[in-house]
Amino acid sequence: MIQKIKSNLPLILVLGLSVVIFLVNLRINFFRYNNFDFGKFDLGNMTQMLWNTLHGRVLYLTDYFGTNLPRWSMSHVDPILLLFVPIFAVFQHPMTLVVSQLVLVIFSSIIIYKIAELELKSKFSACFLACAYLFYPAIGFLTAWTGFHGVTAVIPAFLGAFYVYEKMHKSQKFTKKGLVAFWVLLVLVMMGKEQLPLYIAFYGVFIWLFRQNYKLGLKMIGVGAVWFIVAFFVIIPSFAKYRIEGYNKFATSLGLDTSVTRDVERPNYFLSRYEAFGETYVEVAVNMLLRPDIMVQVFFGGDKLDNLRRTFEPVGYITLAAPQLLIISLPDFLINYLTTEGGIGTAEIYNHRVSMIVPVMFISVIFAISWLSKFLSSVKFLRKIRFYEKLSGWFVLVFSALILGLNIYTTFTYNNPVYLWLTQAVSKRLLGAIALAKTEPDIFKQTDLELGKMAHISRLENKDRECAQKVIGLIPEDASVSGPDYLGAHLSMRETYAIFPALYEEADFVIVDVFSRKILTILDADVTLVRDVVGDLVKNNNYKMALGCGNLFVFQKVEPFEKDSLLPLQQRFSYEEKVSFEMVAPLNVVDYKLPETLTRSQPAKLEFVYKKQESKRLDDYVLFMSFVSRENGEIYQVANLPSFGLTQVKDWETDPYYLETNEVILPSYISEGKYMVFVGMTNNIKNRSVYLGDVTVN
């Protein structure tokens, strides 16, 4: 037993490190989930597809524009998700996919070990390289940041296929069982994403030319090419019509000009990323071939040289000594590095698009070390060395150790989040549960604070986690929802979750985030779009506000009811000023009305009258209210919706008075007692709040 442990000590070390890294990643990923760092894109979409599949709608999801459609309508073909349906049926939670990916990616280190041991004939070298894989910076970003993607989940399938074939090749025993396993693994790889069949085609070229297995190589080239052609030129264009129809409906509902977003109406949504080469598949491909000068300029332009460095530096560029294998990853290098659309980071090591490059890199490292070691040990003058026959093994060990050292060094210099977390944990900066109760420990102790005095209150958060948790608890499981991206993972297990403002006139619940910008970025639309839609919701007698807290407002669809004939934000050119409380110059509060008592879960009205004293601009400011408990400093904040959705502060003029009526529904989770009331302004740089008095909360 002891002898067996000793002989397998290198593998045990790899397994032990893998377990440690897996546990650290579990902690990081659950923290990120609870912190709302995983949104609809992409974990929410992946979860929604599995949930819909369980309910008879195979791989359906809600797209950017509120249309429920199959995955391939969004220009992706990754049916590997179907293999996760059984485990999801048992553990129906978004994190099921994340944990599954962690297991698959992290424990691929074992397959790296087996491939290295097979090729290099050294257990310790195999151990070094498997550990180097675990330290490789991109792996840390894939496991800690990206949630789940099919292209990442098939990393072990590609490594497994390579190991199975190499084992058969070295023994020259091509068994039926081995070939079946090989092809099953290849099919799994191709199911990972639409471009991965090209990996199989290029791998087939390697087997044809460098393993002299012409028959198998040609089959792989043929299968890979056919799968790729069907995915890109048949499936994706055929289903694009559903995306286009949905977008046109969305654009009509918002009065958008569809001519400025032509990429949505293309057969492949992502073709616009290569617009410098053309607008169709054929144009892009032909121009890439005919204009290599532009191709080189784009490939190495901008920050892409730095991305290449961050990809190759951890392995010491040794992969260049095995180009016959490195070329297998050419499809993703071209897809990631030839994008010409600005603001799209496809080549960074923290992007999931690097996923399949990683296993090819490490296979190339193994074979490069093997070749270099044999080459160096064959140098004539080295044959005179006494231990010449051991030189090749020593070179293998030294190169493997150097690769491990480089990966340890670069994992810290590139801020690999896994090892960054470990160093923070060592320095006692441990990630704990998120604090759900925000407090103002200094303010509530000030018994002598005068009305109208400025107070330092926390700014309104642009992602209020406590509020978000309460919103999630409010939404029924069977309700359709339009909401912000970052709630999309938590609310993904339903037929419809659209990104606001999509479906803002149809969804059962509409969640408004006053800071939301995702859909505007996608459409390159003006920020006033969200404001106008919020204004429509405020006036819509089919929607009633169910909750407002922090930066979030929840509107529930109800039977038509009568709303106040006056809008909650009015202009008057004459008003008797009662006070003059300066907020952010030049805006003053000149009157206000607070109820003596607020009842939790019941609507109440707080009224403010503002006067802009001069024409100074107030761009990007949001008005908000803060309620601070007199007993413990617990704070509850909510944005002023009328001044956001009807006429924003930045558009206010100097002549009129602005009368704002805010409907507030204090949630049941806050404590009873006396609360200090503040009205404030923030633009995330400046933050001012004015004390207006106390109310009693029942």
Image (cartoon, rainbow, N blue to C red):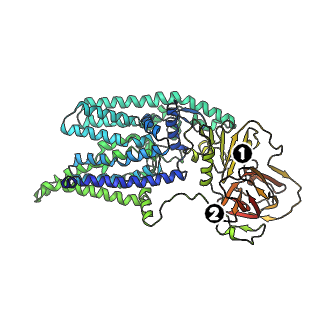
Which residue is at the front of the view, 145 or 341?
145
- Find disc 2 in the rendering and name its residue: 439
User: What is the tally of numbered marks visible in this picture?
Assistant: 2
What x and y, as percent, mark residue 47? 50, 40
142 relative position to 211: left or right: right
Split into 4 quadrants, where in the image is the C terminus?
bottom right
513 relative position to 447: left or right: left
Instruction: Identify the residue at horizontal 82%, vertical 44% (top origin).
Output: 564
Label 2 sits on a secondary structure element that is: loop
Instruction: Identify the residue at horizontal 61%, vertical 59% (top origin).
Output: 437
- Answer with the quarter of the image where residue 615 lies: bottom right
What x and y, as percent, mark residue 358? 37, 47
104 relative position to 569: left or right: left
- Outermost residue toward the bottom? 448
- Answer with the quarter of the image where residue 627 lies: bottom right
Residue 545: which disc? 1
What x and y, as percent, mark residue 519? 61, 43
Q: CA distance from mark 1 to mark 2?
A: 26 Å
Residue 322 can be seen in this image: yes
Residue 193 can be seen in this image: no
Label 1 sits on a secondary structure element that is: strand
Above or below: residue 494 compared with residue 435? above
Tell me the amino acid under the disc marked 1: Met
Instruction: Identify the residue at horizontal 74%, vertical 41% (top origin).
Output: 536
Tell me the amino acid under the disc marked 2: Thr
